[in-house]
Amino acid sequence: MIDDYFKVLAKADKSMFLNINKNSQLITRLYYDGKDYCKSNPMTLEEFAKKSSEIFDIIIDNEKMNNVWEIINKEEVFNFPDIYKDNHNKPIKFYFKGGNVDDENIFLYIYKELEDSLDTFDELTKCVSFDFFKKTVEENIKNKTEFISGLINIDNFKEFNEKYNRILGDVVLIETASTIKQCVGNNGLVCRSGGDEFLFFYKISNDYDEVYKYITDMLFKINGANNEIVDVDTTITVTIGLTRHPLDGNKFDLLLNRNRAALIRGKKKARNCFIIYLLEKCGYVDEFTEFDSKVDDLEYVSGSMGLITGVMEILNSKFTLKKRITDSLNLIGLYFYLDRLVVTEVDPKTNKITNTLAWYNPRSLKKEYKPNTKNITLWKSIYEKSNLLVVNSLEEGEGLVISDVLKDSNIVACVATELRQNDLLFGQIRFEMTSINRHWQPSDISNFVMLSKMISIIYNNEYTTLSHYKEMYFDRTTGIYNLQKWVQEGEKFISDISNDVYSVLDVAIHDFVNILNAYGIITIEKILKTIANFLLTLEEDNIVFGRTADNRFSMIFKGKNIEYINSLFIDLKEYVKDNIQLETGNVLLEAGIYINEDKILLEEALDRAIIARKFNSSFDNATVFTSIMYEKELVRLELESHIEQALQDNEFLLYLQPKINTKDKKLAGAEALTRWNYNFEKLIFPDVFIPLLERNGFIAKLDYAVFENVCKLIKELKDNNQEVFPISVNVSRSIPNFDRYLSDLERIRKKYNIEPDYIEIEITEGMYTDNNEIMKDFINKLHKKGYKVSLDDFGSGYSNISALSKLNFDTIKFDRGFFNDIKNEKETMIIKTMVKLVKKLNMKVLCEGVETADYEAYLTEIGCDYIQGYYYDKPLPLETFMKKYIK
């Protein structure tokens, strides 16, 4: 039999804890201000009365103590007469059994001993022992009783003890145990399983809604009781991990382990919550599972940080954006006990509403949100500078411009803020109460702002990713797949074909550059969009299409129905003809077909379709790839296989084509070109081997070889005191890393100890149209090193004006196709204007491809600085060039 005793808890600035053994009438424990005045030596009531007058703000003598004794034994609520006063002459009030506590009074709580032949009780909380608890639960399991079992942990208990003192910690433990026992009553049992952990079981149906309602009420009561008793700045909460018998197991150890898994999930998720064990939430757990991290390890993380961590896990998962947002709303709403959460999504470009996501608390009366396209504007009109709106009650909302919206949406209290990131507005989020007023705490609001920021970042990341995805995989002009995406989707498409036979159709706009020069970018874009619009009308299940080059569109079809593919091509031509009319006639399309029965790679199949297209002798039908074309392809492969050896053996020879100054008709410089002396037997021209080098990745090696030959030549000229002239070298459009490329050029130049101003770097138009910012950086770095930079092939594409305004070139090289007919008045007007524009921008003008005296005279007349072309000389071998131009 356990001795009768009672405890006195003094609620004051300094806590008092008093333990009196009723049988011996000795004070066995006396704590005050964190000190133990008994020091394990019990004191009598008389000694306590004397001691109390020294250390407490209360005067107690033996007579009064005996009166207290009589009151305790009556076990009733009793207010001491006013004669019992403290040193400040204020009445002392003792409240027995269930009495409320206010800020000025002392609370006395009596614990009545419970009898049992076993040692079944925890001394502090009077909960049963773990062994007794386990035995009782196993009896109920054996009897197949439906019940729930829960593991309750006090949140941040270690931090609480350190911040205040252990006495208050004991108060929290006692109050937590008492509230759990009240909730369980005679229908279950409560055990203190650890320092700040409690186990309970409660006989109840396994119905989810019934369990949810019961445990919600328990969580509310425990938190309420603790925060009412202990008046400190810290909010005291608990987290509960719950299982149901027999749904979650029919063994005690299994249920206990799953309780712990659910508890840890709740701690990581948000704290101040309960988790009912589910496999998909808590993972697989059996009775042998060992937990690497204890709940205590999480104690220093606040509940709100746990929530934020949980939301971050969800937002950064791999699910769809909608699921990530809705799952986050569910977690936030349950944590803060909200009635409703609403996210209104807007398009960052137009600020127009695109979607609304609403979460409703399943335990609240559902009041529907009524979307209104004007809501965003109205909410925005009353935001403070922080873009935050806080409404605590319907009465507060009455004075706002948005009061009608509040009423229409059944909002009683809310916090609203924008979802904004990097000056982009993605919408609005509202944390709402639809049933009761709510005075939002500063901590709630700061958490709302932080969570809103996190969600804004996810929206921004999704928007940026989608933008990058479109830029990476979709053609900007037409909106359909580019080459990279066409290959990706094409390979997926092919993998679903049972017999692996498919056809590739490649369609190109004939005379693309001339159409561009004559009619401009607007007409070109109209043609491209017209072709794309036709393709978008086709059934996606039967075809994969994309714009695979400036003037080309490629398509993949199942099987080898040449007749169908050709008829589709004819329909496309007619569609373009009906929608585009040029002054010079219709837009002509050419096409090639390859039937892939040999199971070669898609990109190789496309190459063969391109080869077939180039063999097209008319514009009536598509040309089908033949064996003759294949034989020519074998020749190409033979050349390609020898390229690496050719680079090692220096088979690539340096050729120079002169650049002539139009003023004095003298040599102004030269362009470095190359010819392939294949096996030192025959010459092969760049139009054959350059595409091969670009394809197999050796093009940079050729660039370095040409650059080194140029540096070597300049050094020889200087060493021999011969005339040194500027030489331009071309940069391949396939260079993957310009910084590394420039570093390699510098290494070669310094090897020969020559000045960089003797060398001009030529960049083609295709390079900057795709990488404008990268190319701008590359050009600036070239200039800093001392190189000149020229734009090659000006007029061969359609982004030239942009390049002139944004990129800092020294020379602009006009492509031969830019001035086809000097008798054409419109063409000559364009040429004159462009030459003037370039010179006003302090750039030199070089016209290449000049073959006749008429062109030479005309270009000289309109102000062209340099001329390059067969009129003066074709590209010459180095020795020939030196003999002819260098003294």
Image (cartoon, rainbow, N blue to C red):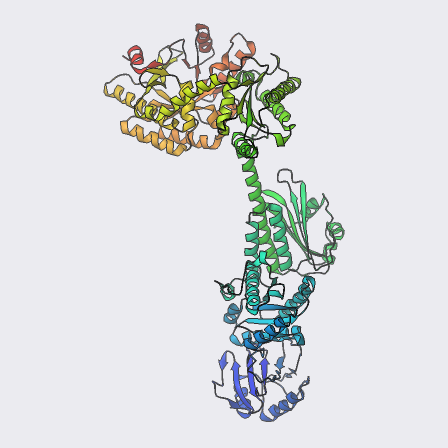
Question: Where does residue 32 sit, x and y in percent of width and height?
Answer: 52, 81
Q: Nearer the viewer, residue 117 or 497?
A: 497
Using the image, determine if residue 371 lies above or below residue 138.
above
336 relative position to 306: left or right? right
Whether residue 810 is visible: no
The quarter of the picture where residue 864 lies is top left
Q: Nearer the viewer, residue 125 or 102?
A: 125
Using the image, determine if residue 664 lies above or below residue 765.
above
801 relative position to 374: left or right? left
Whether residue 169 is visible: yes
Question: Where does residue 72 sit, x and y in percent of width and height?
Answer: 64, 87
The quarter of the picture where residue 331 lies is bottom right
Image quadrant holding the N terminus, namely bottom right
Extreme-front residue of the structure: 499
Q: Nearer the viewer, residue 402 or 683?
A: 683
- What residue sits 65% from the left and 48% below the top? 428
